[in-house]
Image: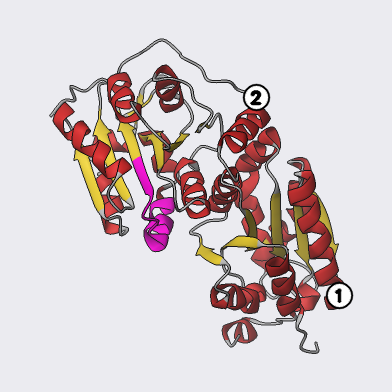
């Protein structure tokens, strides 16, 4: 089944009225998607450390159990850190959701196919690793119900959202890493 | 090699300095310290599938205001190289306690190349290296390293000499 969802619309819908949500964005397209939805001091966009978005979310979720934490990352980025799904499955942070925006491509390097294009099922991996809810999402009503997982229900949750392989205008967040770190800590009371 | 309580002393320093999260990939030399961290209700001990995960863990925890220490053996340092770039770029504090392989008394020749390269690799990626060669120095070196890491936002690896661990064979390691 070919994807119909547009990644920018999905991420915008997930981040709308985000309240106190803390967000980690994986490098590349998902960082641009989060920025297009509205840059925030409480979004930490990665420009490197490929494979570490989910673990950065885990560290944040363990440090701040009273806040909801969302990781938005790509399929290529998630595939580089598959072991982190096992690590999160062991820790079971109730406040963490990992959302993979899955276009089945390495979007920044020439749209080469990732393993998910060949049938690797990230939601099944997350389920097998012990995530509570783990879903593959293909339509906009499922995106709506994903919001309640992110904001309300005890996790950890995982969703792979199948999206079109689109080439979109770059919407870049600030790239000074010290600034991104410091603004996040300043904006987070007690951080 | 006389028995020593340096892992207990390191644990006391970590607890006193309010290190709340300890990520680790096991090493025989860290066995006691890992057990102490799991037994401490004030510390969240997080087993990792690869050392790289520890960098994400520590960075995320720091964004949330908590201090993390990472435990690994020297071969694991080789798994960290690219992600240490993010530590440097963002000036994340980083405290690693690395038990050495490939040094005096090494019983597995395949450990030699990474053991010899550990300090150079860390240095190349901007991580300060503090070597500890006797049990009596361990606690004070870790205490200084904790302060440098979290007060001055430096990245530090404390390398624990293989002589302090004193495992001389696969049989000894298996019987830890």
| Residue A68 or residue B132, whichever sits in front | A68
Q: Position of residue B79 (x, y in %)?
A: 60, 51
Q: Is-magenta flag for residue A108?
A: no
User: Residue at image x 71%, y 82%?
Assistant: B168
User: Residue at image x 39%, y 20%?
Assistant: A37
Q: Are marks 1 and 2 on the same chain?
A: no
The C terminus of chain A is located in which quarter?
Answer: top right
Q: As drawn, is A116 to the left or to the right of B159?
A: left
Q: Position of residue A161 (x, y in %)?
A: 26, 33
User: Which numbered disc covers residue B134?
Assistant: 1
User: Which numbered disc covers residue B156?
Assistant: none
Q: Position of residue A189 (x, y in %)?
A: 57, 41
Return the residue at label 2: A176
Say if B159 sits above or below A60 in the image.
Answer: below
Q: Which residues are magenta?
A: A83-98
Q: Secondary structure at mark 2?
A: loop
């Amino acid at each position: 089944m070919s994807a119909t969802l547009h990644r920018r619309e999905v991420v915008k819908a997930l981040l709308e009225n985000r309240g106190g949500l803390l967000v980690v964005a994986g490098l590349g397209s998902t960082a641009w998607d989060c920025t297009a939805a509205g840059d925030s001091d409480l979004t930490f966009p990665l420009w490197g450390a490929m494979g570490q978005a989910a673990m950065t979310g885990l560290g944040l979720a363990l440090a701040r159990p009273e806040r909801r934490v969302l990781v938005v990352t790509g399929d290529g980025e998630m595939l580089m850190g598959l072991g982190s799904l096992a690590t999160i499955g062991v820790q079971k942070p109730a406040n963490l959701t990992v959302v993979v925006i899955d276009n089945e491509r390495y979007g920044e390097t020439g749209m080469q196919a990732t393993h998910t294009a060949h049938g690797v099922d990230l939601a099944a991996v997350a389920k097998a690793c012990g995530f509570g809810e783990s879903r593959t999402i293909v339509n906009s009503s499922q995106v709506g119900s994903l919001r309640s997982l992110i904001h309300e229900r005890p996790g950890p949750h995982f969703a792979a959202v199948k999206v079109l392989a689109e080439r979109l205008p770059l919407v870049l967040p600030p790239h000074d890493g010290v600034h991104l770190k410091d603004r996040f800590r300043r904006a987070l009371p007690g951080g | 090699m006389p028995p020593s309580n340096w892992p207990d002393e390191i644990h006391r320093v970590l607890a006193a300095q309010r290190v709340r999260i300890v990520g680790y990939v096991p090493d025989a030399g860290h066995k006691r310290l890992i057990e102490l961290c799991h037994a401490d209700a004030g510390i969240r001990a997080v087993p990792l599938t690869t050392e790289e995960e520890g960098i994400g863990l520590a960075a995320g925890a720091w964004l949330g205001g908590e201090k993390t220490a990472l435990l690994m053996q020297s071969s694991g340092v080789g798994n960290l190289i690219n992600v240490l770039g993010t530590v440097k770029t963002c000036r994340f504090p980083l405290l690693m306690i690395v038990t050495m392989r490939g040094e005096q008394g090494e019983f597995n020749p395949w450990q030699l190349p990474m053991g010899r390269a550990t300090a150079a690799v860390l240095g190349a990626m901007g991580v300060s290296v503090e070597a500890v060669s006797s049990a009596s120095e361990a606690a004070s070196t870790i205490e200084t390293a904790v302060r440098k890491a979290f007060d001055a936002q430096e990245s530090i690896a404390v390398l624990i000499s293989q002589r302090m661990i004193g495992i001389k064979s696969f049989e000894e390691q298996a019987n830890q």
